[in-house]
Amino acid sequence: MSDIDALQVAQRIDTVLDILVAGDVNSALRNLEILKSELLAQAGAQKNVGADRSKSPWEV
C-alpha cells in the first residue's frame, strides 16, 4: 500500500487552481501532468494504466 499524503496533494491541486484563476492554462495543465505522474509513480503504477480504462462521465 502506498503512502500518499492527501494534504500535500490537496495543496498542489489548490496551486493548480490558483494558476487557472490567473489565466495560465498551459502551466496548470503541465502541473497536473506532473502531479499525475508523481502519484502514479508513488503508487507503483508506472505502466500505461489508461489504455483499457474508459473515461469517467465527468472527464472531457
Image (spheres, helix red, strand yellow):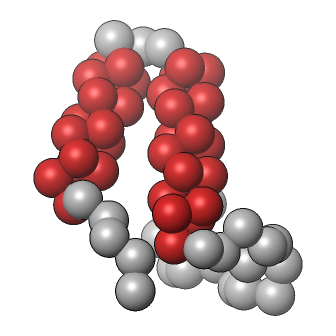
Q: Is residue 32 left or right of residue 22?
A: right
Q: Nearer the viewer, residue 30 or 42?
A: 42
Q: Can you give x and y, in whole percent of width and height, for residue 15 in the image?
A: 29, 28
- Residue at the image point whose x is 40% and y is 76% from the top: 2
Residue lying farthest to the left in this orientation: 7
Q: Can you give x and y, in whole percent of width and height, for residue 46 in the image?
A: 72, 67
42 versus 15 height, above or below: below
Q: Nearer the viewer, residue 27 or 1?
A: 1
Residue 9 visible in image? yes
Q: Is residue 54 left or right of residue 43?
A: right
- Residue at the image point whose x is 32% and y is 65% from the top: 4
17 versus 40 height, above or below: above
- Residue at the image point whose x is 31% and y is 42% from the top: 13
Q: Can you give x and y, in whole percent of width and height, for residue 19 in the image?
A: 36, 20
Residue 59 visible in image? no
| Quadrant the N terminus occupies | bottom left
Q: How many marks?
A: 0
| Quadrant the C terminus occupies | bottom right
What is the quadrant of residue 3 in the picture? bottom left
Q: Can you give x and y, in whole percent of width and height, for residue 11 in the image?
A: 21, 40
Q: Is residue 14 left or right of residue 26?
A: left
24 versus 35 height, above or below: above
